[in-house]
Image (cartoon, rainbow, N blue to C red):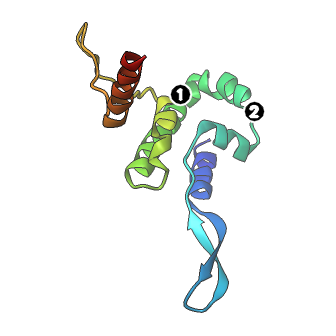
Amino acid sequence: MEEAWTQYKEWCDNQRVLTHDFSAKNSEFVSAELKRAVTYTIEGFCVHTGIARSNFYETYAADPRYRDIVTRMKEECEVDARMKFELGVVDPKLAALWMGKHGYGAKVEALPAGAALDDDPITKSLKEAADAFAKAD
């Protein structure tokens, strides 16, 4: 299992992507094959190794002999995702979605009871115009 996990991580870290762009300097389209990394997931590992996810959890995650490696795999998935967000490898707009899988959540500050949010300038102007229009009728 450990060897398969190591091979999967190597595969994730060494994806090749063909990109195309226009070179204004040479007035031509250019192509390049770039090395990119994808985030580690248990689901990706299962697909890569040909194991059904349900079989992975039933067979390996439930077996005390594999408990340590399965725990380490989950922890490495979490650390890998965090590192890729912090390094800008993965779009930060996806952070809540990805990190939610690992138990993280967006911090939302609660307002005191009875407190209201101030309107932004556009909303405030629209409300004033609506009030003025209502008074004119």
Discs 1/2, front: 2
For residue 97, the mark is none
Dot 2 lies on which element? Answer: loop
Q: Is residue 74 above or below residue 2?
A: above
**Lower sequence index among marks 1 and 2:** 2
Judge left or right: residue 122 versus residue 111.
right
Q: Residues within 10 Å of mark 1 (few under 14, many from 20)?
A: few
Judge left or right: residue 18 versus residue 134.
right
Q: CA distance from mark 1 to mark 2?
A: 18 Å
| Residue in the picture at 43% in, 48% down | 85
Q: Residues within 10 Å of mark 2 (few under 14, many from 20)?
A: few
Q: Position of residue 119 (x, y in %)?
A: 31, 27
| Residue in the picture at 62% in, 41% down | 1
Q: Nearer the viewer, residue 3 or 104?
A: 104
Quarter of the picture containing the C terminus is top left
Judge left or right: residue 59 versus residue 71.
right
Q: Position of residue 73 (x, y in %)?
A: 52, 38
Q: Is residue 99 above or below residue 28?
A: above
Q: Residue furthest front?
A: 137
Q: Position of residue 129 (x, y in %)?
A: 37, 28
| Residue in the picture at 62% in, 80% down | 22
Dot 1 lies on which element? Answer: helix
Q: Which residue is mark 2?
A: 52
